[in-house]
Amino acid sequence: MKTVSGGIRKRSPGRVLCVLLLGALAMTAGSITSALAAEKVSMRLKWVTQAQFVGFYVAKEKGFYDAEGLDMTINPGGPNLNGETLVASNADNFAVAGGIENLLASRARGLPIVGIGMMLQRTPSAYVAHADSGIKSPKDFKGKTVSTFFTGAHNTLAAVLAKEGVTATDVKIVPQAVTMTPFLDRQVDVATVMKFNELNVLRARGLGNAIVVMSPEDYGISFPSDALITNETMIKDKPKAVQGFMNASLRGWKYAIENQEEAIDILMKVAPGLDRKHQTAMLAEYGKLILADAGTSEGIAVLDLPKLEAVRKFQLDRKALEKPVTLAETLNTTFWNAVPVAYKKP
């Protein structure tokens, strides 16, 4: 091969093309290897896509799951889908499940699920009555019709009534509709609301001063909710994937709370039919429940063991569990503890 001035060899066009092709093939092979190396996992939401779960969508959009070696599929929930049973059967690897009371009940029934985080540090549900109804507290529920969600909130209602000395026969409890219409039309005297959802709907309609809001915490009941769960097999056989799920999910939630407008942008890409104003309000209220109590001092999704143990004892005392279960068998704090502080501490 001849040389040009300066001693630089002149390469033929064919050789240059060959080098470029080899480089492209190497990059493609690297991408394929990376994709094959990613662990395929799925998580089940406890309800349909909405701001209640935006942190997980942020984690996916921002590549946080990818960075942990996870190929994550986020499956929405619905009225006929139960995250606890889906994870127990390994149909999904992870889920946002119900509250601590649901998790304890599932373990008492023998389901091999384990709580690895708790998104909401306070009870997300509350009760509303019309201000002119004379209903001021759960003691006034006697002889009234009360609607609630039978997806976990009914357990909280039962606990509040028990604490206030109101028996199940004192109250007519009915399933709650998907809208607040029965309450607004006074077909029910008291309705259950999620503080980040239905309560916002009522306030948006200008009814803030026309309703009485009763929170379980006002009556000594605090049931942390939206447990992050996996199953015993995942913990035993794929602990790296479990840790990666926690790292990425909490990182996504921290980003969502700190960048709420951008987080809603990401959510609207996933579900463009949602009402942006309502979703923005939902995220703001949901974030407050995440950062309540130990959520601020310890970090997002912390398992507040003293508070959770109080719920366990209360449920045992009122014989709400099929058999005694311990927090040690219900929860695993190892993975939350190992999440980098920068990912979970606001």
Image (cartoon, helix red, strand yellow):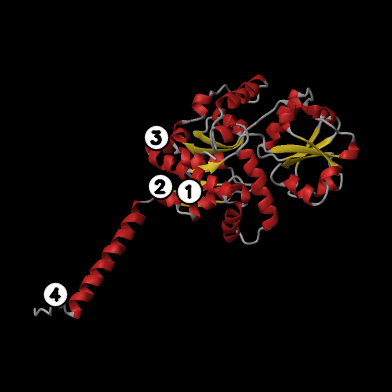
Disc 3 to disc 1, C-alpha distance: 17 Å
Identify the disc placed on residue 8. 4
Q: Which amino acid does the dot numbered 3 rest on?
A: Lys
Provide the secondary structure element on which disc 2 rests: loop
Instruction: Residue at 76% x, 49% y: name it.
Output: 201
Provide the secondary structure element on which disc 1 rests: strand
Instruction: Give the image quarter of residue 254.
Output: top right
Residue 323 is left or right of residue 1, and the answer is right
Task: Tell me if label 2 and label 1 are in contact, CB under 8 Å.
Answer: no
Say which of marks 2 and 3 sits in front. Answer: 2
Q: Which amino acid does the dot numbered 1 rest on?
A: Ser
First-in-chain label (2 vs 4):
4
Q: Which amino acid does the dot numbered 4 rest on?
A: Ile
Q: How many numbered badges does the structure rendering display?
A: 4
| Residue 200 image position (x, y, % from top left) | 74, 47
| Residue 337 image position (x, y, % from top left) | 46, 33
| Residue 342 image position (x, y, % from top left) | 47, 41
First-in-chain label (3 vs 1):
1
Disc 2 to disc 3, C-alpha distance: 18 Å
Q: Which residue is mark 1?
A: 42
Instruction: Residue at 59% x, 30% y: name it.
Output: 105
| Residue 11 image position (x, y, % from top left) | 16, 77
Say which of marks 2 and 1 sits in front. Answer: 2
Residue 130 is left or right of residue 168, and the answer is right
Q: Is residue 229 above or below residue 205?
A: above
Tell me if I can see residue 235 in this picture.
yes
Work out which quarter of the rendered image holds the C terminus and state it. top right
